[in-house]
Amino acid sequence: MKHIRCLPFLLRAVPVSALAMGAAAAMPVASASAATYYINSNLPACKDAGGPPSNSTGTSPEDAWCDFTQINRTPLGPGDRVLLARGARWNQRLSLTGAGSDTQPIEVAAYGDGKGRPVIGYNSMTEKIDGKDVQREIAVRLTNPSNFVLRDLEVDGKDETGTKKLATGISAYYSETGKRNLRIENIYVHRNRTGLLIEGASTLPEDQPALTGLRVTRVRGEHNEQSVVTTRYGRTPSRIFIKDAVFSGLVLSEDDGKIGDSDPAGKRSCPNSLQLTHLTDATVLDSLVSKAGGCPVKTGTTGVHIAHATDVRIVNNIIVDTQDTASPDMTGLNYEGWTTNVSVIGNYVGGTAGPGIEVLGNHADGANTDAIVASNVVVDYGKSAARSKAKSSAFFSEGSRRGSSIPTGAFNDNIYDGSFTNRPLLTNFDKFAKSNNCRTTEDHVWFAAKDFGPEQEAQNWTYGSSDNGHVTPLSYVSGARRWQSAGTDTPPRIDAWTMQPGGGTSLVARSWVAPKAGVVTIRGYAVSYMGGDGAGVQVVHESKKPDGTASTTVEFPRKLVAPGPDHGVSTTIRRLDVAAGDKVHFLVDSGDAGDNSNDVVSWTPSVAYIDGDTSCGSD
């Protein structure tokens, strides 16, 4: 199976409306009583031998503080803003406490016309963790943040000598319950042990969440050992440390923990790029996880790790190229244990050194129950020469001789190549329902987000809109990395992950063009998560009659996608006969009311050629 690597067009700008989901409201204007603090290490006074004036107030760009000493001592309240100068750098910890309100959050962001984001680099200091003094290298420390926004920052964990790195780039630490609405957006974290860490104290009670309303958007992580982690300390398997979380627009790549050519692998541990533990009601979508697990770990490596979690949705992501380090697993996504109702739907998983997706039974007291694995593409796995073929399959499970559990759930509507599951290894998938999983023997499976680019018909995809039954091509806007109508910045729009129609009866169309005659199977999962009033989706097959005129057939009748990440619509077409040049249009309209405001639909369909009905079954 030929594995096509992901294109840079996946680094897209998420619309501002993506932030207005659930408990996380859009940014309001600060109240008159709120304070704004400016910090700029590049001011001339900050570089003078005598240092800055001692009477700097930090309340204007001209009178900015040079470093974080004063702001670290300042309690923050509703509407307060901490602004860091673009192009400035500090090798000092930024340590903040405080709570905003639902209408007046605290904001940490960037200001000025300097080049690039503000950068916070390596530092080291002692702090108390669960009552113990611990030496930790952290760039940004938020303690019990509530109604808090952190955005537009870069954390570079490598020290000036190139021999040390930060333990954590950004930490949000919770030792108290009842906190609300933490938003982290447009952040670049690299060369840390952990890039972004949302962590809970072991003393947190079991019966209530510490944080309700987490939004992590447009976080880019590179060369960390782990890029994004949620965890709660202690041995008790709490499942409600975080409630109501959405992770979107993540780009996590090459997590090998390297800070230099002389950095030995034995001093690094790279278990995964995205770790989701101790949370409930969470969604991950429209994200790329690539080249995870870049250094060996005795307990195994994976791209996405899920444990101690309930009601989680992993939807419409690309998870590829988990690296070959001769570790156990080396998989794309791993259900570790203690999970209930975790759904993995509409993802592309490929190029992994080990299996595609694992649902393990290694913990006698921590079964994975009610797992839903559906409408995914899982191909080109098992690339490690060190891993036996017996342990390489699209979907994999194994138990432990110290005690195993049997996972339960369903495999539905997946596209895969090679072997569906492995032979039993102390556990199996006997308690999984299985239906309509299709095996392809072709060299390529089309997946809309992976194939997205700036040219019409590249990778057999076109991008258009329709107001009168005929599809009109859209124009590509390189700065926004999306297709839209020429000469306007209003919908319709199509980017790698999402589609937004124009208003009224207008449709937006992402279309696949058949390169040859044959039988194809189609998968997809449409979800509208930006707070609109719902959008309609349908699939139409356009072919040519013998006289050369177009003929259209509705292959997937229109369905309304209700707003919210837990209201998606599966768009499966089990088989479709196509001729070369036929088009399959994936269409989105603005719903029954014709109002397209925030009707942004995440939908990245997949298409594969199969050998007729014999390729699909209950494997």
Image (spheres, rainbow, N blue to C red):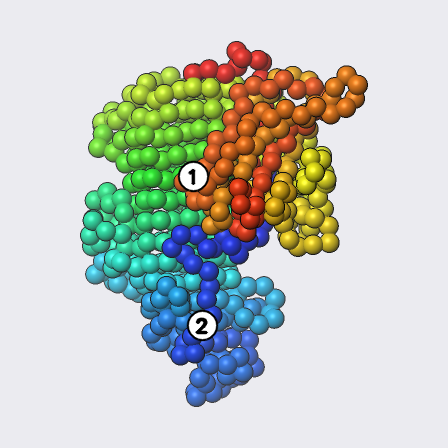
State the residue lying farthest toward the right.
547
Q: Is residue 615 above or below residue 295?
A: above
Seen from the viewer's position, the closer of residues 8 and 16 is 16
Image quadrant in which you'd find residue 587: top right
Q: Which residue is mark 2?
A: 30
Residue 90 seen in the figure: no
Q: Amino acid at mark 2?
A: Ala
* Left or right of 554, for residue 185: left
**Residue shown at 32% from the left, 54% from the top:** 212
Residue 497 location (% of width, % of height) = 56, 42
Write the residue at 43% across / 62% down. 149
Q: Quadrant of the N terminus?
A: top right
Q: Secondary structure at mark 2?
A: loop
The picture places residue 111, in percent across and down from the top left corner, at: 54, 70
What mark, if any, has residue 567 been given in the picture? 1
Residue 426: x %, y % from top left: 29, 21
Task: Return the disc, 1 or 2, that comes first in the chain's sequence.
Answer: 2
Q: Residues within 10 Å of mark 1 (few under 14, many from 20)?
A: some
Q: Evaluate whether residue 29 shows in this view.
A: yes
Q: Position of residue 151 (x, y in %)?
A: 48, 61
Question: Residue at horizontal 56%, vertical 48%?
Answer: 596
Q: Nearer the viewer, residue 478 or 294?
A: 478
Front residue of 42/449: it is: 449
Residue type at mark 1?
His
- Residue 32's place in the image compared with 152, above or below, is below
- The answer to whether residue 436 is above or below residue 509 is above
Residue 135 as seen in the image, left or right of residue 103: left
